[in-house]
Amino acid sequence: MRSRNIQFISKKLKPLTQIYAFFDNIDVTKYCVPKLLEINMLSGVFQVGETVVGKVGSTGLGPISSSPVEIRFRVSQSNHKEGPYNSPNTTFSQNPYTNQTLQPNYSSTSNILNVDTFSLSNEPQGTFSGYVESGMELVGQTSGAQAIITNIKLIPDASSTLIGSFFIPNPNIGIHPRFQAGNKTFTLVNNDLNDQNLASTIAEEGFLSSGI
C-alpha cells in the first residue's frame, strides 16, 4: 500500500480508556494522529483554519533508511468534533485527557490543538499528510504560533467518541511496516498486544486497497 492518511471515527468505545491501534494485526499506534493533540504553547495563538507544520528532525544516529517524522494539517476549532472545521455540528464538551471544559477558542495557554482529520485524510498524498511524535514542534503558517506536542494517546471522550487519522507509512523506508494491497482490518482495542480475550472494548472496520 502506498503512503496516505485514513480517518477513523468510533462512537462506542469505553470512555476515557487508553486505546491501541492495529492494522492487519500489526501495532500502528505510533502512526495514529489523535484529533485532539496535547500541546504546550511556546508563543503566539493558533488560528482556526490555518495550516500547521510539525517536524522532528533526524538525529543522525539512526539507520540510513530512517526518515524524520513530519506532518502538515489544518487546524479545526478547539472543541470541534464533527461538521465544518470552523463551524462544527457537534463539539467536545471536555478535554478527555484532563476532564476540564474544552473552550471553543485558542489562547496563549491552550493545551489542546484540534486536528482537522477529515482534510488530513481527504486525498492520498495531498495538501495535508503525515503523523506526529512526542516532542514535535508545531508552527502555525499564518499566525506564527509555536507549540510542542507533550504526549500522544488515543483516549475516547466521556461520550465514547474517538476520532483520529491513521498514517500508512512510506513502504520504501526500511524502518516502516509494509502492507500488501487488499482487504485489511483496522482495530482499536484497549490491550497493547491486541489480545481480544483480555480486552474490554474493541472496534474494528475493514479497509480495501487496490490499484495498478
Image: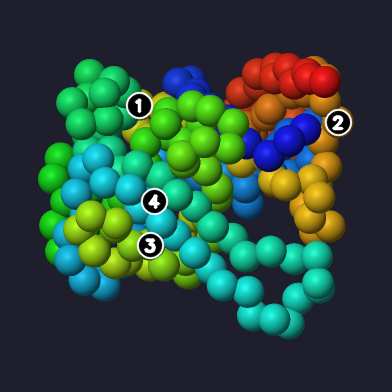
In the figure, is residue 41 to the left or right of 71? Answer: left
What residue type is disc 4 on?
Leu
What residue type is disc 2 on?
Gln
Residue placed under numbered mark 2 in the picture: 180
Whichever of callouts 4 and 2 sits on the residue coming sooner in the sequence is 4
Contact between marks 1 and 3 (CB within 8 A): the answer is no
Contact between marks 3 and 4 (CB within 8 A): the answer is yes
Residue density around tag 1, few if under 14, some if 14–19, many if 20 or more, within 10 Å: some
Q: Residue drawn 58% across and 37% down?
A: 125
**Image: 42 above or below 204:** below
Whichever of callouts 4 and 1 sits on the residue coming sooner in the sequence is 4
Whichever of callouts 2 and 3 sits on the residue coming sooner in the sequence is 3
Q: Between label 1 and label 2, give the one nearer the viewer.
A: 2
Return the residue nearer the eye: 61 or 11. Answer: 61
What residue type is disc 1 on?
Ser
For marks 1 and 3, give the CA distance: 28 Å
Whichever of callouts 1 and 2 sits on the residue coming sooner in the sequence is 1
* Quarter-of-image position of residue 42: bottom left
Instruction: Check disc 2 and report its element: helix, strand or loop.
Output: loop
Residue density around tag 2, few if under 14, some if 14–19, many if 20 or more, within 10 Å: few
Whichever of callouts 1 and 3 sits on the residue coming sooner in the sequence is 3
Instruction: Check disc 1 and report its element: helix, strand or loop.
Output: loop
State which quarter of the image contains the C terminus: top right
Instruction: Check disc 4 and report its element: helix, strand or loop.
Output: strand
Residue placed under numbered mark 1 in the picture: 159
> How far across and down, in percent of the image, does residue 197 sit?
77, 30
* Circle number at residue 138: 3
* Circle number at residue 139: none
What residue type is disc 3 on?
Leu
Using the rendered image of the protein, determine whether residue 18 is visible from the camera's viewpoint. no
Instruction: Check disc 3 and report its element: helix, strand or loop.
Output: strand
* Quarter-of-image position of residue 186: top right
